[in-house]
Amino acid sequence: MPIHDKLIKALSSLMTQITSDLNSLNILESQIKDINTYTLRPASGKLVGVIASDSSRVYRELRAAVLFAVQALAVRHIPGIEQVFIDAEAGYCTIPIGGVKAPIEEVVRRVAQFTSRELELSTAASLIREGDLALFDGSLFSFLWYGKLPGIPEEFKFAVRQRPHTLRDLWRSVASKLLEAKRRAQLLFIAKTIRRNYYVDKLLSTQSNTVISALNDLVIFDLLRKRGSLPRGPHFIEPIYIERSEDLPRPLKSLDPEDMEYVKPILPVTVTYVVFSYNSPPYQLTIPGKLNPEDLGEVLGALLPHSTTGYPDPLRVAHNMCKLTIQEFKAILAKLGLTRLLTGRELLGEFV
């Protein structure tokens, strides 16, 4: 792919502003309060079973339809034993003649998103035993986020399940399965990418003219680590608790009252950050239920022996085993004889 001079010029023009913003963030280091941390050690006693679930989804936009595929996988790991459970779903929607309120591409992507969450929960539930920990990739709140909930066109077809009438039906199925899993196991949602901030206001002692909008929890913790206020070894941060529905991050706190009834049972929620090995990055944990530091130490201590790489090994395995690339999806379509599905991009040398 060629890189043109105008792109280099555009990036170069941003360098002064980027450098200024980074320098402003470094000035904040002295204004950040310290926070309590707790050393993380392996829990004593028998190793617990750890279940991890993840999914992968792909899409293809055709001339007259949009196609999606989802595959989900859960793995249950205890020393010397590994169980795997796999499920999948596919669907497509032809472009309705009369059109729909939301673009059909958006509807298909939202359906696939909810379907992948539902499959992650159902595959994990098939392996859960008493006393297990169940791990999911991402934040608990992003897992339940839904945004707009348009109707699902009659032209929408699933491979396995019946078509729900609206995205709200699918979302409620996800929320119900989450609550059922919560009754059977200790759920931990582990996020690598941070879009919500819970510690910035707590730890930033003064307001300043610096670029506060550029701050997030990980930047704050990186500055604390830089000045030696955080340990290098395995530890977790003093937890905070979200106990009321009005304290939920947007848009969850503005859900319709009927939908909020599906969310209230997860409250309170424990929020913390955990480091599993020396010099590894912190990961955000959102956990249904209120765990004090001692209880949290027991739960994370049980997970620590399963995190030898600095990240929970079962989650890494689940991610690698469920991953479906667009190249693989193209190969599947070709093997099934679906090369005749036109995308409009054939003259560029692209198939499906």
Image (cartoon, helix red, strand yellow):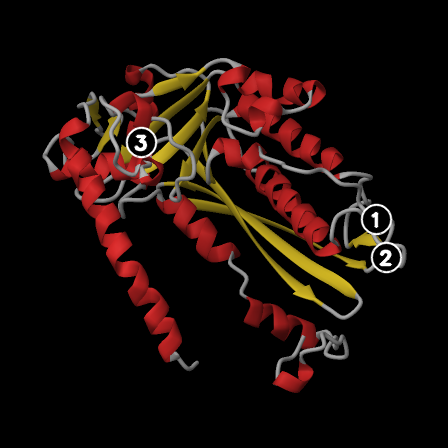
Of the numbered discs 3 and 2, the one sitting upstream in the chain is 2
Callout 1 crowding tier (Cα within 10 Å): few <14, some 14–19, many ≥20: many
Of the numbered discs 2 and 1, the one sitting upstream in the chain is 2
| Quarter of the view holding residue 190 | top left
Callout 2 crowding tier (Cα within 10 Å): few <14, some 14–19, many ≥20: some
Tag 1: residue type?
Pro
The location of residue 161, given as percent across then percent down, is: 78, 46
Evaluate whether residue 297 shows in this view.
yes
Specify whether 136 is left or right of 308: right
Image quadrant in which the N terminus is located: bottom left
Of the numbered discs 3 and 1, the one sitting upstream in the chain is 1
Label 3 and label 2: CA atoms lie apart by 46 Å
**At 73% across and 61% down in the image, what residue appears?**
66
Look at mark 1 in the image and give the residue it sits on. Answer: 153
Badge nearest the viewer, 3 or 2: 2
Tag 2: residue type?
Pro
Tag 3: residue type?
Tyr
Q: Nearer the viewer, residue 183 or 202?
A: 202
Q: Tell me whether circle 2 and circle 1 mark residues in contact (CB < 8 Å).
A: yes
**Residue 96's disc number:** 2
Evaluate whether residue 233 shows in this view.
no
**At 41% across and 82% down in the image, what residue appears?**
2
Specify whether 167 is left or right of 349: right
How many marks the image carries: the answer is 3
The location of residue 75, given as percent across then percent down, is: 48, 45
Image quadrant in which the C terminus is located: bottom right
Look at mark 3 in the image and give the residue it sits on. Answer: 273
Specify whether 310 is left or right of 112: left
